[in-house]
Structures are given as structure tokens and as C-alpha cells.
Image (cartoon, rainbow, N blue to C red):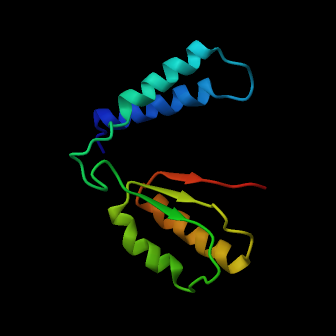
Amino acid sequence: MALGPRCGAIRACRRVLERAFSLRKAHSIKDMENTLQLVRNIIPPLSSTKHKGQDGRIGVVGGCQDDSPNAVHEVEKWLPRLHALVVGPGLGRDDALLRNVQGILEVSKARDIPVVIDAVS
């Protein structure tokens, strides 16, 4: 599959961010300014002429009190419309819920949707 220039830029940005914000060593303000400029070059600016979702749609799988036994199927229906997925804020450690999260991660991976996992051990 051929990758567009935006995808390559995003991968380059990820590598720079990983280096710039590594916890292994202290970084100069100049390093962080360079990194932030790279991010600004990749992320489209906000504008009053754009409508919601025009620059991307992000789904969030977070905690709630009632979990559906067919949550994976329900979320999978939304995945074709998303550009990225955030998983984890407030999920807890309930076994049924974690099985659903595992299924959601598997179907997201199969669709090659970038996922950010917010997890605290």
C-alpha cells in the first residue's frame, strides 16, 4: 500500500516527539520549540470556515457504568468513520469490560486505525 506524504510526515513527527520528550534525558527549550514547530506544520490550523470533523474524527472508548455484551460490534460500526481512537480514560479493571476493550483494539488494528491508549497501572 502506497503511503501519502502526510502519513510519512506523521511518522517523522512521531519519531521526533519520541526523541524530544523522552524521559531518559533532559532536553533544551530549543529542542522542544523545534518539535512543536514540526507538530504545527502537520496539524491543520483551526478555521471558522471548516465544519466539525473536516480535519479528522477521533473516537474515545472510556469508562461508563453500563457495558453492553455486544460493545465490540457496536463500536466496530463506527470505526470506518474514525481517523484515530483513544482508549482507556476511566475504564477500570472489570473483566467483561476489558474483554470488550481487547476486541475493540483488535478490530481497530485490523482496520489500521491509530490508537492512543491512556493507561495507569
Q: Residue at x 37, y 36 (%)?
A: 43
| Lateral position of residue 80 relative to residue 20, left or right | left
Q: Residue at x 72, y 19 (%)?
A: 26
Asked if residue 113 lies left or right of residue 81, the reply is right
Given residues 96 and 54, the one toward you in this image is 54
- Quadrant location of the C terminus in the rendered image: bottom right
Number of numbered labels in the structure image: 0
Query: What percent of the width, then of the height, locates residue 20?
Result: 60, 24
Percent of width and height locating residue 48 = 25, 45
Where, by quadrant of the figure, is residue 103 drawn?
Answer: bottom right
Residue 65: image x %, image y %?
Answer: 65, 80
x, y percent for residue 108? 47, 62
At horizontal 63% and vertical 28% (from top left) the residue drawn is 21
Residue furthest bottom in the image: 69
Q: Going 52% across and 19% down the picture, which residue do you hit?
A: 33
Above or below: residue 116 compared with residue 60 = above
Which residue of the protein is positioned furthest toward the right in this rendering? 121
Q: Establish if 62 lies above or below 115.
A: below
